[in-house]
Amino acid sequence: MVVLLSLLSGCETVATRPAAHRGEISADAAVAAAIFGPGDRLWRLIAADGRLYVDTSDDHGASFTRPVPLNADAERVLAQAEDRPVIAVDAQERVYVLYAVGTPGAATSYLSVSNTGGRSFQAPVPVSDPAKASGHTQDVMIVARSGRIYAFWNDDVHMGSARAEKQGAGLYFATAVAPLVARLSNRKLTDGMCNCCRIAVDVGIDDLPVVFGRFVFPGSIRDHGMLKVSPAGLVGPPWRVTDDDWRIEACPMHGPALSVAPDGRYHAAWFTQGRRRQGLFYAHSDDQGKQFSNPMAIGEVSKLAQHADVLAAGTRVVLVWKEFDGRQTHIMSMRSTDRGGTWSAPSAIARTSSDSDYPFLIKDSTEIFLSWNNAEHGHRLITIR
Amino acid sequence: MRNVKPLLAFGLVLTCCANLAAADQRPFKTGSLSEIVATQEGKPFLLNVWSLTCSACRAEMNMLAELRKEYPDFSLVLVATDDIARSAEVQAFLLERGLAQVESWMFADPNPQRLRYEIDSGWYGELPRSYFYDARHERIGVSGALKSEQIQAWLQATRP
């Protein structure tokens, strides 16, 4: 994604005046991730010419601080659709950025930490061993309520890219409690992860992370599975969640989404072109992901409905996804106020005729927002009511 | 989705090697598919859509290179969904596999979704994606890495 940096807007109108920092960061910059931290401070991770920057806003995007650089030199940071850097902020405003650098023969994930509330970042340190493929690590990271951080990524370091393609890559993780003192050790959790689809992760009500990802099941079936993780590693074996029967030897480049509600209900969204069903789907689970409700189709197949995100806050649940009508890309939304039981009709909440990123949902203490990049408007924050 | 710009040094290395290549990468824009199809008039051909970032595509490209040794007249057209800014990398990749002479296009539109839609309004962008065109240019689209036997069977079937 390459977009001009532009200012965020706290409501549905768009501010497109030039960003104050454009002189310092290349115009060829993109907001790779955005998240709210303590005090409803908005944190953005910006990728520009192989460097990463973090800026913040205390007024929902009306104004931003001067971007702070993370990595000293330009690197080949993987910052594209399924494979992007990630930012996490804990309750003490410690900031963690996980990102991957690809070279022609390897991809390595790095972690950079700020213990100064984002005013400065420690030099990034590798958290993964170099994978053999030059792309695809699908970094994800989450901070549990306890403050423990969990980082996950895909890796073919133990098997090579050819086998990873056929049988799936390994899912690795590293975990630590702040403040980080030594280099993190990493560990493989499972094999069989589709190596080109982003991974979804959220923390359950037991404060342990749940990972939802596309697996490669026997026969090149690329359906989804789940696994639960504690600081010691896997909690039981991974289990299969979707049974769409998508037999494909290809890169679907279409990872799922997961949000665990405060009541413990798992909300999941995913894409398939399987024999049993095709398109985008939503389902929820009340038994920690063992059984899910009947998949509900989302969006219009004729408009290539794709790249959904889901977010639960209280009893509210929001779904967003992309559609393309041949000329314009629309970000569509459906809303539920009863824990995903019933849903509003889909409505368009943003659109562009330019290139655009995936839609992401983020929340502050009271509201749910769409966070979306497109080349026409830059990065936008749109309240979803 | 375009990558952030590759490291400068990396680009230079590949540019130096790519100079050995014969054919240039052609910019795939609105209307390019019609151009390709018109050039192939009356002939069956295989349109292969791929990307540098797709590992299944890279493996498939090795198979296509082998097959072309066996069937030199096999009509193959490549379209990389990587932005044309990465042409040196694609050029080097094809050269390494002896595919530098194959007709090769690269996405060259600020909005790649528009190009994907023009290729196939029902395609979600999964790669590799192949289209078997017969002599009348009726086509069959396939997602996923092709098997050598699959293409050979098609070659036999479409031979005059």
Image: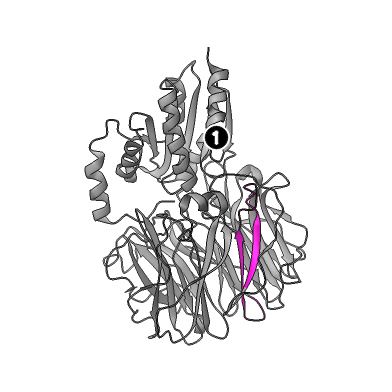
In the visual, does A291 lie left or right of A307? Answer: right
Residue A19 point in image, percent of width and height: 34, 66
Q: Nearer the viewer, residue B64 or A314?
A: B64
Residue B9, by quadrant, is bottom left
Amino acid identity at mark 1: Lys
Q: Which residue is mark 1?
A: B147
Q: Residues within 10 Å of mark 1 (few under 14, many from 20)?
A: few
Q: Image quadrant for the C terminus of chain A?
A: bottom right
Residue A54 point in image, percent of width and height: 38, 73
- A109 drawn magenta: no
Tell me the magenta residue range: A204-228
Residue A151 point in image, percent of width and height: 50, 72
Kindly identify the residue that appears in the image at 62 percent across and 47 percent down: A220
> Residue under mark 1: which chain is it in?
B
Kindly identify the residue that appears in the image at 69 percent across and 71 percent down: A316
Residue A315 point in image, percent of width and height: 71, 74
